[in-house]
Image: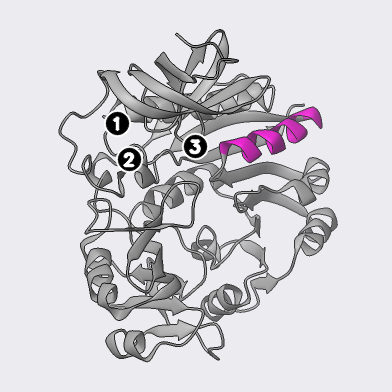
């Protein structure tokens, strides 16, 4: 068997864990080794392609012994797009248990915080849940990028997609699309929103609710009382978004004042507008404009400097934030000093959530509850909700 310094980097390795991002982890000569396409319990032959002092990275060559958690007859196993989802053949409940562990381990390793992590899911929506996707086109193929490349992998009808999203994909496939195309479908209506950077007569003829970067207005539809705006962020699943809203509502409780940072279209706060003092802030002009039509003068465009000023100027029952994957580092000092009863932090990235949680805890806040939400079944992605209160 080759050593890490050998010119022949093929190794046999037992996979014992999974990392944030989905790669399997084993140890080779007492060094952590990340192997894409593997699950805990697999034993594989792999080829090392990258090294550092603390870790190795290897490509799967051969499955020697499959994990007991591996679905042996996955519908996606033979598809070229299978590596994009990574966990298409990871069975439940093990998949959910590892998502819990990923969040807990990120908090321990990055945040220095040991805590229990709850798991929340909707078992009825482990497939056919996705209502929004960004497809990539190269004029011949339409699908997703292969991992770590910009090579387009053609996407056949996907079991994770809602039926209407698959129908839109099939209609777009022959249109010779180049670049990114954002598609959002109403799972309980007829609307299909399509967003392109450059105009396309062929796409606009097939999908009337098509906008592009220079469009004056934005098409939209209302779902669960919230405007879904073409080209603006919404959760990948409007159906699983109901689970996120329910869990967030339970943590907000009977708050009389709510500061909603990175609020987007008001997804997590708009339904409080009639009985709670709300200010929402985001940089996305189209989403803010749509939210203000539903709750006038409640939402405003602004950057992190605007957010920091609002944190400092007022006392809040609840400060709610749902930042992008990079987290909320620019406002953490202001949050740490906030005059608030509670901070509720929603995150799609356990690593940046753990980094920001460390700063809050070091400043006198306590992480009183943490939950991992399965918003992206059969992928390694996981949503996290953390609740912070003053430790005194």
Is-magenta flag for residue 183? no
Magenta stretch bounds:
350-364
> Gap in Å between the C-alphas at discs 1 and 2?
7 Å
Residue 359 image point, x, y percent? 77, 34
Q: Name the residue under label 3.
A: 21
Residue under the point 58% across and 21% down: 115
> Could you say whether the residue bearing mark 1 is in a helix, strand or loop?
loop
Please give the count of numbered marks on the rendered protein.
3
Q: Name the residue under label 1.
A: 90
Q: Name the residue under label 2.
A: 378
Which residue of the protein is positioned furthest toward the left in this rendering? 73
> Could you say whether the residue bearing mark 3 is in a helix, strand or loop?
loop
CB under 8 Å between callouts 1 and 2?
yes
Q: Is residue 356 above or below residue 195?
A: above
- Nearer to us of marks 3 and 2 is 3
Residue 157 image point, x, y percent? 21, 59
Q: Is residue 67 visible?
A: no
């Amino acid at each position: 068997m080759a050593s890490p310094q050998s010119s022949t980097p093929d190794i046999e390795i037992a996979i014992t864990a999974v990392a944030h991002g989905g790669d399997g982890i084993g140890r080779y000569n007492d060094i952590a080794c990340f192997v894409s396409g593997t699950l805990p319990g697999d034993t594989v032959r792999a080829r090392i392609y990258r090294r550092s002092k603390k870790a190795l990275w290897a490509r799967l060559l051969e499955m020697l012994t499959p994990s007991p958690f591996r679905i042996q007859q996955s519908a996606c196993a033979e598809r070229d797009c299978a590596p994009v989802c990574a966990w298409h053949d990871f069975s439940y409940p093990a998949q959910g248990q590892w998502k819990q562990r990923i969040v807990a381990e990120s908090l321990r390793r990055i945040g220095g915080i040991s805590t229990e992590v709850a798991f929340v899911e909707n078992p009825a929506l482990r497939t056919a849940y996705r209502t929004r996707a960004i497809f990539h086109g190269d004029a011949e193929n339409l699908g997703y990028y292969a991992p770590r490349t910009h090579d387009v992998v053609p996407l056949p009808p996907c079991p994770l997609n809602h039926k209407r999203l698959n129908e839109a994909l099939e209609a777009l496939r022959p249109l010779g699309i180049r670049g990114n195309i954002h598609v959002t479908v109403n799972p309980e209506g007829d609307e299909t929103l399509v967003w392109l950077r450059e105009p396309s007569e062929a796409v606009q003829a097939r999908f009337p609710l098509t906008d592009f970067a220079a469009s004056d207005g934005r098409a939209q539809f209302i779902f669960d009382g919230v405007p879904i705006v073409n080209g603006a962020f919404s959760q990948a699943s409007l159906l699983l978004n109901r689970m996120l809203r329910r869990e967030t509502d339970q943590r907000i409780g009977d708050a009389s004042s709510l500061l909603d940072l990175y609020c987007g279209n008001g997804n997590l706060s708009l339904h409080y507008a009639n009985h709670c003092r709300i200010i929402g802030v985001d940089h996305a002009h189209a989403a803010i404009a749509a939210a203000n039509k539903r709750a006038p003068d409640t939402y405003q465009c602004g950057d992190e400097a605007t957010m920091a000023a609002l944190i400092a100027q007022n006392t809040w029952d609840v400060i709610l934030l749902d930042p992008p994957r990079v987290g909320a580092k620019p406002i953490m000092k202001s949050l740490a000093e906030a005059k608030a009863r509670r901070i509720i932090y929603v995150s799609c990235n356990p690593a940046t959530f753990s980094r920001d949680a460390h700063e809050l805890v070091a400043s006198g806040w306590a992480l009183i509850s943490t939950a991992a939400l399965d918003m992206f079944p059969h992928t390694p992605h996981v949503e996290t909700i953390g609740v912070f209160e003053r430790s005194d």
